[in-house]
Amino acid sequence: MLNSGASAKPTNQSRWMSLIEAITNVAAGYGIAVATQVLIFPAFGLHTTLEQNLKMGVVFTGVSLLRSYVLRRLFEKQCRHRQKYGGPT
C-alpha cells in the first residue's frame, strides 16, 4: 500500500549527501557519455581520438556535476521553505 505522505516525516538531504549523490550519478553516466561520443561524433563528421573524447567527457562531467548539485540544493531549499511556511508539498 502506498503512503500518501500525510503522516510521513519529511527528511532533508545534507549538502554532503547531495554531493555524493551527484558524483555517483555523473560517474555512472560518464562511460555512457564517452561511448555515445565515440559512436555519434563520426555521424556528424567529427573525428576525434579516444583521448580527446575522454578529455571532453571530463569537461562535460564537471558541468553536469555542478548542475546536478545546484539543482539538488535549490530543490532542497524549496522543500525547507514549504516546511517552514506551509503550502503544497
Image (spheres, rainbow, N blue to C red):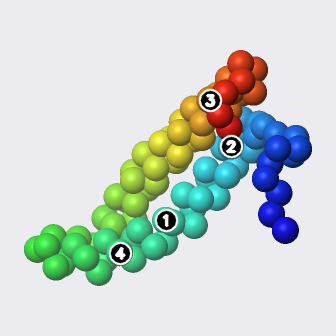
**Of residues 4 and 50, the one drawn nearer to the viewer in this rendering:** 4
Give left or right: position of 42 versus 8: left
Q: Disc 2 or disc 4, which is closer to the eye? A: 2
Q: Which amino acid does label 4 sit on?
A: Thr
What number is the disc on residue 78?
3
Residue that mark 1 sits on: 30
Question: Tag on residue 86?
Answer: none
Q: Can residue 35 be seen in this view?
A: yes
User: What type is the residue that disc 3 sits on?
Assistant: Gln
First in sequence: mark 1 vs mark 4: 1
State the mark number for residue 18: 2
Q: Which of marks 4 and 3 is in front?
A: 3
Residue 31, image x and y in percent? Answer: 49, 72
The reply to whether callout 2 and callout 4 are in contact (CB within 8 Å) is no
Mark 4 crowd level (few <14, some 14–19, many ≥20, 10 Å Cα): few
Question: Of helix, strand and loop, which one carries label 2?
Answer: helix
